[in-house]
Image (tube, helix red, strand yellow):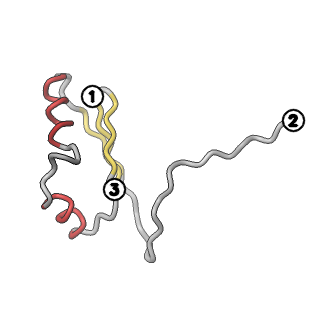
Amino acid sequence: MKTEERKTGYLVQEYKQPVKRYCQTLDLRDNPELISEYRNRHSQEKIWSEIPEGIRQVGILEMEIYLLGTRLFMIV
C-alpha cells in the first residue's frame, strides 16, 4: 500500500505575534459588466496607494480576495 503524499497549501508568512485569520463571503450581482469593473478597480495597477497603507494601519497583515462566479471570498 502506497503512503499518501501530504499536500501543503501556499506558504504563509510567519509573524512574531499571534495572528488571526478572518474569512468573509459576498454574493455579487450576476452582471458580467459590473464584475469586470470590480476586477478592474481592484487590480494591482488601479488600486490607490492609500488603500494598502490604510489596511496595514488597522492591523491587517495580509489580504486575499478570490472570485468564483458571482461569489467573492476575502481572507484577512
Asked whether 19 or 45 is in front, the reply is: 45
Q: Which residue lies furthest to the bottom in this view?
A: 16
User: Crowding near pointer 1: few (<14 within 10 Å), some, many (20+)?
Assistant: few
Q: State the image coordinates of residue 37 (x, y, percent, origin top left).
A: 14, 33
Q: Which residue lies furthest to the front in this view?
A: 45
Count of numbered circles on the image: 3
Give the residue type that dot 2 points to: Met
User: Crowding near pointer 3: few (<14 within 10 Å), some, many (20+)?
Assistant: some
Q: Is the residue 15 above or below the residue 10 in the image?
A: below
**Tag 3 or tag 1, which sits nearer the N-term?**
1
**Tag 2 or tag 3, which sits nearer the N-term?**
2
Q: State the image coordinates of residue 8 (x, y, percent, origin top left).
A: 59, 49
Asked whether 33 or 23 is in front, the reply is: 33
Q: What element carries label 3?
A: loop
Q: Is mark 2 on a helix, strand or loop?
A: loop
Give the residue type that dot 3 points to: Val
* Residue labelled with disc 2: 1
In what quadrant of the picture does the N terminus appear? top right
Q: Residue furthest right?
A: 1
